[in-house]
Amino acid sequence: MTEPDGHVDDNEEGQAAISFRGPNCAESAEYSEIIFEQQGAIAVLTLNRPDIRNAFTHQEMIDEIVDACQRVQDAESVSVLVVTGAGSSFSAGGNVKDMYKKEGMFSGDPNDVRQNYRKGIQRVTLAFQRLDVPAIAAVNGPAMGAGCDLTCMCDIRIASDKARFGETFVSVGLIPGDGGAFLLPRVVGFSKALELAFTCRVIDAPEALRIGLVSEVTPAERLLDRAMEVAAEIAQHPARTLRLAKRLFYLSQGRSLEETLELSCSFQALCHHSPEHMVALEAFFTRQRNRDGLREQA
């Protein structure tokens, strides 16, 4: 079904896959496995395979996610990326049917599978790791295995009250092959990450909030609106400064204080000579003069 100001596709689970198309959409890229669009300074990437619960271990979807991340990285007009899933699932992670049949990236001998991971899903992890634009995961439903790790590839996670999370690799005789052993401990802490990985326990949104896996939980019908509100709050700030700030935080992980301070002063020197800095200062002093004027009138 298509409406004048938006695009809604029904899927087999009876949910709606929302596509931000219309007069307020600056750009809409055509993909077959994802939906990728830009609204002002905010880009939205929607995993669009609800028929397989948005599993993303097949090459077509991997290629499209990586390509979309590169578009965001290259586009100076983009300040924030929102990632979500079509249908009732965020992402099931790996396609277990392909695993069982030894098809796709799970085909071949052990060396083939190793190379398949490198050329496949690990490219998604690296694409997000190299992304300087802040990324928000709007987790609309279950995020299992690599789907859970995909949320951790983003900087901020906002969960629907229908979201569930599971680091469930061990339950199917696997380990996190997508970088989850690196990502999850940095979000919830080492011990809690081990607990989730070893037990394969699936947790609900309130539990995810309690352990810091997500920053907030919102009703399902409000999820995307809330993610866009947070994105807009971020996007009001200078785009290039946001990118530098994100890169500084990530580069500081695992470095000494001295190394972090050196990175900080180098990045800060660039900021002090940026036009965005002067514009922000002028706006600050304008607001201050207006406040002073109102006080004098009072």
Image (tube, grey):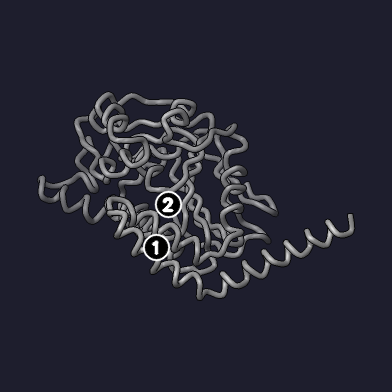
What x and y, as percent, mark residue 168? 30, 31
- Which sits in the foreground, 296 or 259? 296
Question: On the image, numbered disc 2 is attached to which residue?
Answer: 33
On residue 264, the disc is 1
* Residue 98 higher or lower than 122, as above or below: above
Secondary structure of the residue carrying tag 1 is: helix
Q: Measure how far apart labels 1 and 2 are at the Cα level.
A: 39 Å
Disc 2 is placed on an element classified as: loop
Earlier residue among tags 1 and 2: 2
At 37% from the left and 40% from the top, the residue drawn is 187
Answer left or right for 245 relative to 253: right
Q: Amino acid at mark 2?
A: Glu
User: Where's the C terminus, which quadrant?
Assistant: bottom right
- Looking at the image, residue 255 sits to the left or right of residue 264; the answer is left
Instruction: Name the residue type under label 1.
Output: Ser
Mark number displayed over residue 273: none
Q: Position of residue 25 (x, y in %)?
A: 62, 60
- Residue found at the far front of this picture: 296
Residue 173, quarter of picture: top left
Q: What residue is drawn where x is 54% and y is 67%?
A: 77
Residue at the (46%, 52%) spot, across then down: 135
Q: Residue at x 38, y 43 (%)?
A: 152
Q: Choose between 76 and 234: the one closer to the eye.
A: 234
In the image, 267 versus 230, the foreground residue is: 267
Q: Is residue 191 above or below residue 131?
A: above
Name the image quarter holding residue 201. top left
